[in-house]
């Protein structure tokens, strides 16, 4: 299923807004992606709602994850 050019442009616009609003995120992801995310690394995620409820999970990176992340990294 291919995305329409209009949706791709909107996604790019929203990405640029996100990067402008959160300037530390992309350098962090680039650094972690280059230096830390490899097989057997653990990625932890945590979200705290405005009400204070915490949502957490983690994954141990496997070979399939590494392949997928490489594909994403090389899609520019």
Image (tube, rainbow, N blue to C red):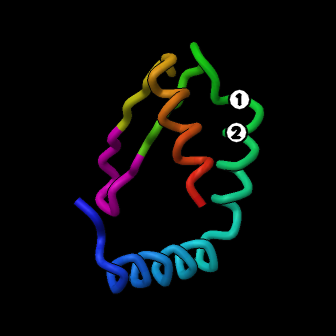
Residue 75 place in picture, x, y as percent = 56, 54
Residue 4 place in picture, x, y as percent = 29, 77
Q: Residues within 10 Å of mark 2 (few under 14, many from 20)?
A: few
Q: Based on the picture, tell me whether residue 35 belongs to the magenta stretch.
A: no
Q: Are marks 1 and 2 in contact (CB under 8 Å)?
A: yes
Q: Residue at x 71, y 29 (%)?
A: 36
Q: Residue at x 29, y 59 (%)?
A: 51
Q: Secondary structure at mark 2?
A: helix
Q: Based on the picture, tell me whether residue 52 belongs to the magenta stretch.
A: yes
Specify the label residue 36 is tagged with: 1
- Which residues are drawn in magenta? 47-55
Can you identify the residue that label 2 sits on?
A: 32
Q: Residue at x 37, y 35 (%)?
A: 56
Residue 70, relative to residue 28: is it above or below?
above
In the image, 60: left or right of 50? Answer: right
Residue 60 place in picture, x, y as percent = 48, 18
Q: Residue at x 30, y 70 (%)?
A: 3
Q: Secondary structure at mark 1?
A: loop
């Amino acid at each position: 299923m291919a995305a329409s050019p209009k949706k791709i442009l909107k996604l790019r616009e929203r990405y640029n807004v996100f990067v402008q609003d959160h300037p530390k995120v992309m350098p962090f992801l680039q650094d972690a992606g280059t230096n830390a995310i490899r097989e057997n690394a653990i990625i932890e995620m945590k979200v705290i709602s405005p009400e204070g409820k915490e949502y957490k999970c983690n994954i141990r990176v496997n070979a399939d994850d590494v392949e997928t992340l490489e594909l994403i990294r090389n899609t520019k």
